[in-house]
Amino acid sequence: MSTRQLKLGFILHGVGPGWGDWRHADADPTASTNIDFYLRQAKLAEQGKFDFLFVADSVHITEKSSPHYLNRFEPLTILSALATATTHIGLVGTLTVSYSEPYTVARQFASLDHISRGRAGWNVVTSWLSGSAENYGKPSHPPHEVRYRIAAEHLQTVQGLWDSWEDDALVRNKASGEFLDPSKLHTLHHQGEFFSVRGPLNISRSPQGQPVIFQAGASEDGRNFSARHAEAFFTEGSTFESSQTYYADIKKRAATFGRPAQRLAVLPALRAIVGRTAEDAERLYSEAVALIRIEDALVALARSFNEHDLGQYPLDGPFPDIAHFGSESNRSASERIVRTAREENLTLRQTALRYASPRREFVGTGVQVADAIQRWFDGGAADGFILFESLPFQLDAFIAEVVPVLQQRGLFRQEYEHSTLRGNLGLEVPENRYTAARRQVA
Amino acid sequence: MSTRQLKLGFILHGVGPGWGDWRHADADPTASTNIDFYLRQAKLAEQGKFDFLFVADSVHITEKSSPHYLNRFEPLTILSALATATTHIGLVGTLTVSYSEPYTVARQFASLDHISRGRAGWNVVTSWLSGSAENYGKPSHPPHEVRYRIAAEHLQTVQGLWDSWEDDALVRNKASGEFLDPSKLHTLHHQGEFFSVRGPLNISRSPQGQPVIFQAGASEDGRNFSARHAEAFFTEGSTFESSQTYYADIKKRAATFGRPAQRLAVLPALRAIVGRTAEDAERLYSEAVALIRIEDALVALARSFNEHDLGQYPLDGPFPDIAHFGSESNRSASERIVRTAREENLTLRQTALRYASPRREFVGTGVQVADAIQRWFDGGAADGFILFESLPFQLDAFIAEVVPVLQQRGLFRQEYEHSTLRGNLGLEVPENRYTAARRQVA
């Protein structure tokens, strides 16, 4: 039995991650703002002993945006709503540092961490859609390397605010009338390049001390940011080999920052399709592929090329030479897409449809999908996965067919070990910086 | 039986609105960040058929802040958490326009309105503590009249974003693949003095169309803002006479903006103390007063004088001449305090203690408190009240002793009439501006 345990997240995305998912006969096309749908999925994932729920985000749409981008719950509110309907599963939300205030971000995640009694996580992103700036009164979207400087300072400020209160700052002595020990409430006085925040935060230190930091950077700047600051990495996981390379790279970078490899979970996206039989799975796969409209697949693909209009190229001609349209933040993705199309001689249509389809490797019976998961887990490509639901009720199928196999193999928990996200991910609660300083002086 | 019905809100404030409330033997001194305490109170208020829960806010503390300011849940997260644990009660949260982005505010309240299926309300405030600016990287807090210009433009922008989607914009036709009717998704293109927001909002129109707008302005600018924009007014309610004057004034101002008086609810704060007998109530009142420390009462009183240090004056001397320390936003409150102290020849100590104590008028049996409520309601001083819990389990007592009397008198509902806050407050769902424009053209 393996002592190293798989970590599993589940991404909540309303009408589904694919452009046509909502058209499936069993799909609820109102799911994106249907609280009952979210409650059902959250409770189900908790029954399946998943480590966490994950809510993605963006702050800019046009009428051409995909269905799940167009219309969706704001992450902090929906995660708070799910907090009181669950007891053990982590609650991870995306929030951009580009268009948010550290004081408010620190408050909202600390509040979620109190509400959930220690299950909050923050997926730190720098918004990469250039239209986002226009929703926040900014003349232009900052360039890539500046966005990561903003991110580092924003995160540092938020984490500083989370240490405003030492664990025992609230004395609450009814007899003496002493509510607070003022020597244990600390003012941050942050004055940086982008932010100036005095503090202290107006909410006491939360159960995890510091909510867990997730990140998903693929660029050079993004990887260094992740390796230095993040505790879990959400990766695209396009192939086994590219994931192995990413995995080794990120763990090596983390080591140079003095961070132990086992404290960093690399979690590729997993778009599994699970059937009770192999034929069943093939049928479901065909259903998933049939839902994809080529025009939607083109717009989805365009996200890796800074929303460059792909409709101008012949669909059945060779894939166009457009790697240079990839923005800094997804340059690695756009280059890989072009390279793969060249190597396999794919047309634009074939490339777009492949990009929009689930990977064949994770299509199969519970044992087959568990085999693929174990290959990645044992092969240095993943510490776990974040599951996307590619067809309705695939979370149900994954829990019924795949989870028991992983449990039998000793790869995944039978019961939650802890009631906090840090506990279940095997991460320590960081000591408050002021408490640590006092202890070192003493 | 009266057709006009009382509106009742309940303010959730953790360790209590008074400085010493947490010291009561029955008080939970951890209440401010105890989700179980909040869940219990929310469910209880819903059993009592209250119209809404109310969460106050501020964005600046020092080590001298009062216990319920120091440490508390952030409003949007706690209200979202309570949304899935309740079904009918409204969820109203304070959020400052001074230090927030309209796009994020619009998203979070629209998301709460979807999550709660139509129960969200926004208490629009302009932060009045000057230290707030320092938590948001601003060199100085804007002056009073600028804050209300900011407020008007911020609110206008948020309400514009809430109309981004017409009610039938999401077609969701599985056969044709048409998810959205792009002609019914609207881009705001707001360019104003303080904000520039393109839109559209990335969440569809919520069940109430527009979450309900609350306001609490007492100054000249604040009253005009309320009269023009707000649907419910939270007032201090210091005396019956001052409330009558405020009530008449605000309804008259609203009429000049063409707004019908019955669409505006004036709701003074109510710090009732209810006993099963009059003696019981007197004993509870004594308990409440005994919890007040004079040094805390002074700091609380200082809030009306822009945190001017009152400790420098003799406690048992005449009340000092300090009306000029009142900031613009609470000038009316500070002047009234000074005037009352002069007229009644009160010392600084007597003034501070009176200010920190519940009003005698609302101390008594269920019938006595119901009588006082009815006097205000029938006498043109209130359309309802927002109840503060001055002692532990006073919400229980109010629901057990006062609510049944109000119900017997036909002043308050036996059951919820609606499942939305607008429905229960008797407010219509505003028609989407673009739908209205199209209807008028046709």
Image (cartoon, coloured by chain):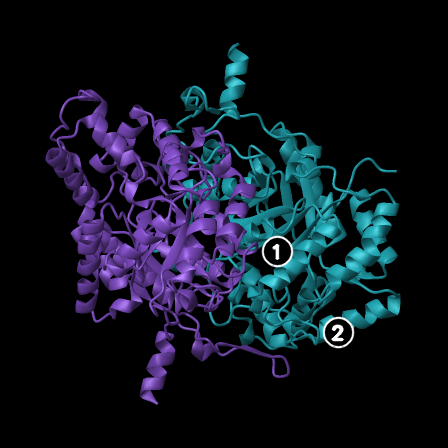
Chain colours: A cyan, B purple
* Subunit ID for the residue under disc 1: A
| Residue B44 in the image, given as x and y percentages of width and height | 51, 50
Question: Is residue B11 shown above or below A419?
Answer: below
Instruction: Name the residue beneath numbered marker 1.
Output: A333
Note whether A288 is above or below A323 in the view shown: below
Residue A227 lies in what quarter of the image? top right
* Amino acid type, label 2: Glu
Q: Which residue is mark 2?
A: A287
Furthest-top residue in this view: A442
Residue closest to the eye, B338 or B1: B1
Q: Residue at x 39, y 58 (%)?
A: B406
Q: Chain of mark 2?
A: A
Q: Horizontal and vertical percent for residue B136?
A: 35, 41
* Residue closest to the eye, B396 or A359: B396
Q: Is residue A125 left or right of residue A277?
A: left
Along the line of sight, the residue nearer the viewer: A341 or A40: A40
Secondary structure of the residue carrying tag 1 is: helix
Side (left or right) of A399 relative to A182: right
Q: Could you tell me how far apart the alpha carbons at marks 2 and 1 are, in whole angstroms?
A: 27 Å
Residue B276 horizontal/vertical position (percent): 44, 43
Which element is circle 2 on? helix
